[in-house]
């Protein structure tokens, strides 16, 4: 198993990415290819006393940053760490690719260089929400405008992911909506409710309201990327808001500080639950090979967890499974016509 | 000032509604009309030792429940407590109307019986989010499909509300979106960004991501009712989830229980911040007279706060102001054509 890492992209690149690459190599027993500026990588390794002898380095000076256009990865910046990594994955010079960089560019590159699974209309960004039970949000931001057939594919891909990675046999699929009744929502959501309800490939539990999402209302939450992005960022913002409110409460006076001391481990537990670095990254479901988007603010630990996730993804045969489902849906549609 | 209350609708009706009506009468110095089953109202008053002598009662046996169709308020159930209350408001037999009942029916009734302000295309449900600074979410669920001109009117109505009720002079209007760049979002949101940016009637601060909403990114947050409902319920769900997580932490062992005791007042403060009953209800902006939707789970205190809000709404001339803005927008549009 060989994982390619773009060590130049992300808020904490290259330092935390290089550290994460070494940590992954040492702890996960996988081969690592680090794509980035070799001089910088070697300098970091020397300064941090990291052993990078067993890590393969592919040198490039070009980096895609957050301001770059998404298509730059296949045009002006195809020789960037992200572009080269995706090309290597496409050619089979690695089993999975991890990047903490520009999401739009990574998705565009994955779609145009690595390509989609045959029969899949759109690749989606899937994010596991770390709430009462793990809930896979699909799509969390890649596809702003979709149709109900695309949402059905998201439901199928999400179900396969939750089965293979979380061992959930018949994942409960919910459709995000503004009410539980099947007639709720826009025309798209009404149609999607019908289509998901009739689908033989998933276990549809109906519409799910956002307020039930934290309490494990479903295992796979399907929606368009616009609404999904609002939900994801709202959960992110509210978690941050609460932790800050709590911190202010604790630091108010001696008694509250004492309480904080007694509760330290517990509050740490809550913080850990909401901490992106504990949960690896977001897979691009629908791409023909494993591409994992690590959180932009990933530290070394988060990078290692994203690599761990990439390895599971590559090992469990998710892509073959999605491919079979896509064919089955296609056949049924052809029969109907 | 006379406020009409539908005392038969809501999860805790009629008990908490009757108690809330009496509480409002005693504390706010306004006249109250209670619409509902007179026998039940008198029985509750006697059992709870409430003085209802100075409250006007309008008797009806009919109640709209959560399963009723929205149009029932003007058809089969026009003699319901909600229907009668709206008709009284329309005829000028009260200055404002408060109901904790079926939101769809209340909006339909308000629109068809009380009518919209001239020039306003759609009435919206506006909800104040109790976060770092009060943020008015408009629309939070009434209008599932809208166009950019409707969103512009939401922005104007929301700005007037925040000025009149919260004293915010030039309210910062944000457009909910999946990114801050002006080119983000669906076609609707791209167009809305242009239109809001060019509008002379508002102080537009651009697109706002959901993660910034808790931290006071804007005073008025504009979006369609589908996305707004997802955001509102996500904030509601996350608040509940966090309070529950915290409670579990506190009740784990002796030390944590002791800490909980020391922090009691502080945690109560957090709880209070997120408690719907502290914040009154949601006004239907765009309706020609004040209609306030109290939270479905309102207790007596929440009902009183909704009445307080109704009084402010009626007193501050919000409706005249919105009316003037609507005319101004209309004139500008006519000039352009």
Image: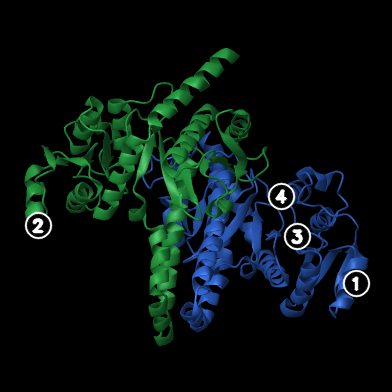
Chain colours: A green, B blue
Q: Earlier in the sequence, mark 3 or mark 4?
A: 3
Identify the residue under disc 3: B10
Rendered position, A187 above or below B25: above
Name which quarter of the figure residue A321 lies in: top left
Q: Chain of mark 3?
A: B
- Viewport quadrant of the C terminus of chain A: top right
Decide if residue A322 is on the left or right side of residue A31. right
Q: Nearer the viewer, mark 1 or mark 2?
A: 2
Q: Position of residue B167 (x, y in %)?
A: 53, 68
Identify the residue under disc 1: B42
Q: Earlier in the sequence, mark 1 or mark 4?
A: 1
> Mark 3 to mark 2: distance in Å?
65 Å
Q: Are marks 3 and 1 in contact (CB under 8 Å)?
A: no
Q: Nearer the viewer, mark 3 or mark 2?
A: 2
Q: Chain of mark 1?
A: B
Task: Name the residue: 68% across, 42% down.
Answer: A181
Which class describes the residues within 10 Å of circle 3: few (<14), some (14-19), or many (20+)? many
Q: Nearer the viewer, mark 1 or mark 4?
A: 1
């Amino acid at each position: 198993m060989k994982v390619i890492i773009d060590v130049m992209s992300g808020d904490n690149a290259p330092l935390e990415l290089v550290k994460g690459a070494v940590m992954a190599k040492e702890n996960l027993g996988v081969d690592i290819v680090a794509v980035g500026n070799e001089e910088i990588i070697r300098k970091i390794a020397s300064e941090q006393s990291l052993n990078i002898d067993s890590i393969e380095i592919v040198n490039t000076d070009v980096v895609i940053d957050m301001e770059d256009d998404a298509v730059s990865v296949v045009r002006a910046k195809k020789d960037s760490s992200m572009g080269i990594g995706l090309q290597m994955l496409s050619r089979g010079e690695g089993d999975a690719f991890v990047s903490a960089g520009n999401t739009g560019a990574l998705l565009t590159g994955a779609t145009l260089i690595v390509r989609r699974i045959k029969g899949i209309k759109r690749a989606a960004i899937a994010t596991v929400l770390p709430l009462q039970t793990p809930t896979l949000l699909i799509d969390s931001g890649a596809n702003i405008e979709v149709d109900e057939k695309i949402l059905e594919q998201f439901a199928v891909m999400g179900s396969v992911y939750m089965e293979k990675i979380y061992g959930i046999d018949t994942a409960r699929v919910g459709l995000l909506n503004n009410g539980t009744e099947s007639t709720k929502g826009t025309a798209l959501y009404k149609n999607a409710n019908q289509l998901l309800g009739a689908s033989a490939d998933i276990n549809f539990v109906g519409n799910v309201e956002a307020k039930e999402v934290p309490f494990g209302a479903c295992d796979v939450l399907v929606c368009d990327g616009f609404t999904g992005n609002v939900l994801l960022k709202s959960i992110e913002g509210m978690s941050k808001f609460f932790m800050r409110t709590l911190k202010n409460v604790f630091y108010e006076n001696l008694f509250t500080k004492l309480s904080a001391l007694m509760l330290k481990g517990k509050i740490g537990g809550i913080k850990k639950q909401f901490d992106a670095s504990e949960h690896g990254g977001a897979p691009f479901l629908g791409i023909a090979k494993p591409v994992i988007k690590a959180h932009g603010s990933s530290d070394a630990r988060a990078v290692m967890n994203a690599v761990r996730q990439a390895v599971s993804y590559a090992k469990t045969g998710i892509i073959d499974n999605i491919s079979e489902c896509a064919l089955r849906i296609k056949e049924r549609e052809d029969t109907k016509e």
